[in-house]
Image (cartoon, rainbow, N blue to C red):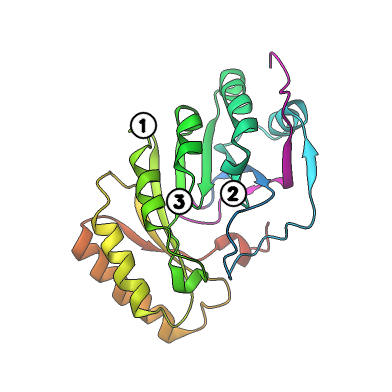
Amino acid sequence: MTRCSLIKASLNSMFVSIQGEGPLVGVRQVFLRFAGCGLSCRYCDTDFAERIVCDYKHIYDFIYEHLPLHSVVLTGGEPLEQVGFLYQFLPNLKASLGIKVFLETAGYLPQEMQVIRDYVDYVSMDVKAPYAAGIEPLWDRHRRFIEILSGEIQLILKLTLTPGIHENDRESIEEFLFGVDRDILCLVLQPVHGSESDRGFIATLFDWQRRLISMLGIEVRIIPQVHKFLGME
C-alpha cells in the first residue's frame, strides 16, 4: 500500500464469508457492504441504520488479514454511489494485492461505472423488475449501464423474484434481455428468501427458465440465496 485515500467510505458492514448468490456460489470473499441506496426495493434485506466510516488503510488491513480470497465484493446498498472513494481505493488495492473485484450493483448509475470499470473483474447486476421491486422501471438506465462495461468484465444478470410474478414484469424483462448485445456469464433467477417452499412459484420459475434458455440461447440458472440457508451473512 502506497498511500491512504483522502475520501472515506461509509459502510454498513465489512465481513468475510462465501458468495451465496449466482454462478460463483461458495467461493471465499471479503464483503464491503456500502451504506445507502437511491432505490427502495420492497424486498431489500439490508438495514442501513448502522454505518461505520472507514479509511483506505482500515479496509486494506481487513482484506489482507483474511487472505487468501477469491475476490473482494463491493455490495450494498449501492456501491457506485460512493464512486469517489472507489476511484481512489480500487487501483491501489489491485496494484498492492492483485486481487479480483466483484461488484454487486443495481445497474442504474452508468456514468459512475465508467469511472471504475477498468478496475472491476465481475459485475453482478440486479435487473429490477418494477412490480416485484416496487419501483419505477429502470430499463433505459440498465441498457446504458451494460453498454459502457468493458469487454474484460464478466457480467452476471440477476433477477430477484417474488411469488406471483406479474405478467407485465415478465414481458418487459424478456424484451430487455432480448435486446442485450453482450456476452453474459449467466442469467440467475433468484427466488426471494423464504419463498422456496412455494412449490407453485418454483414451478413457474422452472417453466420460465426453459422459455428464457430457448429465447435467448444463454445459460439460465435458478439459484436461491445459499448463504442464508447456512446461516451466514
**Secondary structure of the magenta portion, mostly?**
loop
- The residue beneath circle 2 is 78
Camera-nearest label, 2 or 1: 2
Q: CA distance from mark 2 to mark 1?
A: 22 Å
Which stretch did the figure color magenta?
Answer: 1-25
The tag earlier along the polypeptide, 2 or 1, is 2
Camera-nearest label, 2 or 3: 2
Check residue 152 in the rendering and tell me which mark sits there, or answer none.
1
Which residue occupies 61% across, 19% down?
96
* Left or right: residue 89 compared with residue 11: left
Is 57 within the magenta?
A: no
Coordinates of residue 63 in the picture (x, y in percent): 69, 33
Which residue occupies 47% across, 80% down?
163
Q: Please identify the quarter of the rendering in which residue 89 is found.
A: top right
* Amino acid under disc 1: Glu
Check residue 125 in the rendering and tell me which mark sits there, or answer none.
3
